[in-house]
């Protein structure tokens, strides 16, 4: 394998992070980074210089973003399929755009550290994010940026670096928010449900609840026999994230202490599936908001600020009582995240992998990348190689509820996204909910989408 030598007059954690992502996660390539111009001049082979001119090196323009320590609003421009803050107008550099800065901005989620408009759940809508604004969110643009540098380097030296790409892989993931629709709920919840259905004249719902509780029909949300059978048929890796909280109205109505839930977990493990934590609604943000509207927390600030992390640790510890290993994988409920708080607390709790990096209201590449990669904390300018981010490419709820796709449209966008991940030798991860695979009412036809994705991924 060839070795790539990179010079920069300033070696910063930001630059080290980009080089790490490109040469270890986008591809496998030996690299040496130096800030000694004298040493760099003595080297032979493929040499890149970032931000400084050398006669015998492939020179990349630097706009300064990777040499900064602050977090500020950025202006981005587009030319030749590249986003950039500024460019080499003198024509001196072989790569006139700062590709490294563009990659860093996307994978570090720089824009999510800035003030943003939020939805009622504290999430940044896709329309507020750069790649969606540009219409590039269906492309793994970070891989293309890296390929741009490799090709430009070839044009300069006349021969390619021998780069080893990762193999394409895929994984099906499931968020188990509601393992059952009516079974195994607390008695009072079902009693309230009967009264509510009757008062609202929801007779079909009343009837389904009655016959489900009498065990005359199968609980509609318990689709696991179907799911596990299909996963086995297509031999697909899978992971299920377990939600174990009834604290918030948008959390589950079930608890992991129930034997039926424990039996389900063991069934998933026996099928070869992994188990991860589905950290609940109130764990994601620095302050616990128990309602969907802003509330005054001045009277109990310590409680609201300490509660999310304490709850996260409690949920993790409870899950670990029922699985044969530590819970080191996580996905946030409702994909609620706040940078850098959510990841900081997940690391502190012992989580090593997070699967929340996806759009809640779109499909595509939220960070422009299709492989797992390490977290970079912009507030501390620190690389965390022991905490890996697994990009989520598409979710059933995004397609059906937010984008209003028909099953036929969903199949086509799935093909497009899977093809894109295969093109860049990435890792395709999708998200399904067991309670959406009953193939009835608004979800009629979506089993076909699920099965097509399984066969195509």
Image (spheres, grey):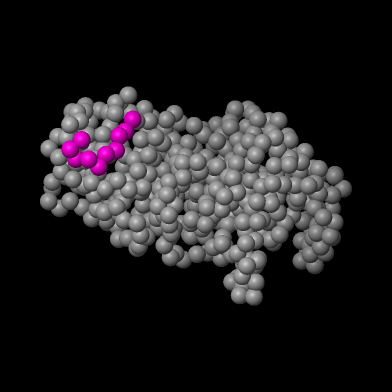
Q: Is residue 433 in view?
A: no
Magenta region includes residue 32: yes
Total marks drawn?
0
**Residue 22 position by quadrant:** top left
Q: Position of residue 228 (x, y in %)?
A: 67, 34
Q: Which residue is more in the foreground, 326 or 242?
A: 326
| Residue 19, above or below 291 | above
Q: What range of the chain is rendered magenta?
A: 30-39
Q: Which residue lies at the image location 60% right of the left edge and 64% below the top edge?
A: 305
Q: Is residue 67 left or right of residue 251?
A: left
Q: Is residue 301 visible?
A: yes
Occupied quadrant, residue 38: top left
Residue at x-position 42% and y-position 30%: 166
Image position, residue 152 (x, y; %): 22, 37
Question: Can you name the residue that lies furthest to the right here?
Answer: 214
| Residue shown at the point (47%, 36%) measured from the top left | 427
- Quadrant of res 160: top left
Q: Is 34 left, or right, of 421 in this rendering?
A: left
Task: Please report the residue visible at 73 percent of the width from the left and 35 percent of the height from the top.
Answer: 266
Where does residue 243 sit, x and y in percent of width and height? 67, 49
Q: Position of residue 279 (x, y in %)?
A: 63, 51
Please check the rendered image and state whether residue 104 is part of the magenta-colored stretch, yes or no: no
């Amino acid at each position: 394998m060839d070795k790539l030598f990179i010079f920069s007059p300033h070696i910063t954690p930001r630059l080290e992070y980009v080089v790490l992502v490109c040469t270890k996660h986008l591809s496998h390539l030996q690299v040496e980074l130096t800030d000694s111009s004298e040493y760099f001049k003595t080297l032979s082979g493929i040499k890149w210089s970032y931000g400084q001119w050398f006669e015998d090196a492939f020179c990349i323009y630097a706009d300064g973003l990777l040499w900064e320590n602050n977090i500020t609003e950025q202006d981005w421009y587009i030319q030749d399929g590249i986003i950039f803050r500024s460019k080499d107008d003198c024509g001196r550099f072989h790569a006139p755009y700062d590709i490294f800065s563009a990659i860093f901005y996307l994978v570090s989620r720089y824009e999510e550290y800035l003030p943003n408009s939020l939805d009622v759940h504290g999430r940044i809508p896709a329309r507020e994010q750069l790649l969606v604004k540009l219409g590039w969110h269906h492309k793994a643009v970070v891989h293309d940026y890296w390929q741009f540098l490799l090709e430009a380097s070839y044009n300069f030296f006349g021969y390619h670096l021998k780069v080893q790409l990762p193999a394409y892989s895929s994984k099906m993931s499931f968020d188990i928010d509601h393992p059952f629709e009516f079974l195994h709920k607390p008695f009072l919840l079902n009693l309230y449900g009967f009264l509510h259905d009757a008062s609202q004249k929801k007779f079909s719902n009343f009837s389904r609840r009655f016959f489900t509780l009498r065990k005359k029909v199968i609980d509609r949300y318990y689709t696991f026999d179907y799911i596990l059978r299909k996963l086995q048929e297509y031999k697909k890796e899978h992971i299920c994230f377990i939600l174990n909280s009834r604290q918030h109205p948008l959390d589950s109505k079930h608890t992991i202490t129930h034997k039926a839930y424990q039996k389900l977990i063991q069934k998933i493990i026996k099928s070869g599936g992994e188990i991860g934590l589905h950290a609940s609604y109130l764990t994601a943000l620095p302050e616990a908001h128990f309602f969907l509207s802003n509330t005054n927390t001045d009277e109990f600030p310590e409680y609201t600020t300490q509660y999310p992390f304490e709850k996260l640790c409690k949920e993790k510890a409870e899950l670990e009582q029922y699985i044969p290993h530590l819970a080191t994988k996580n996905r946030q409920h409702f994909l609620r995240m706040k940078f850098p708080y959510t990841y900081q607390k997940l690391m502190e709790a012992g989580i090593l992998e997070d699967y929340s990096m996806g759009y809640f209201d779109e499909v595509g590449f939220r960070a422009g990348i299709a492989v797992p990669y390490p977290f970079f904390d912009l507030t501390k300018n620190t690389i965390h190689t022991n905490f890996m981010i697994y990009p989520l490419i598409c979710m059933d709820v995004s397609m059906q509820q937010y984008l209003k796709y028909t099953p036929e449209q969903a199949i086509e966008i799935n093909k497009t996204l899977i093809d894109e991940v295969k093109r860049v030798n990435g890792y395709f991860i999708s998200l399904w909910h067991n309670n959406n695979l009953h193939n009835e009412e608004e979800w009629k036809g979506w089993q076909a989408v699920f099965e097509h994705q399984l066969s195509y991924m």
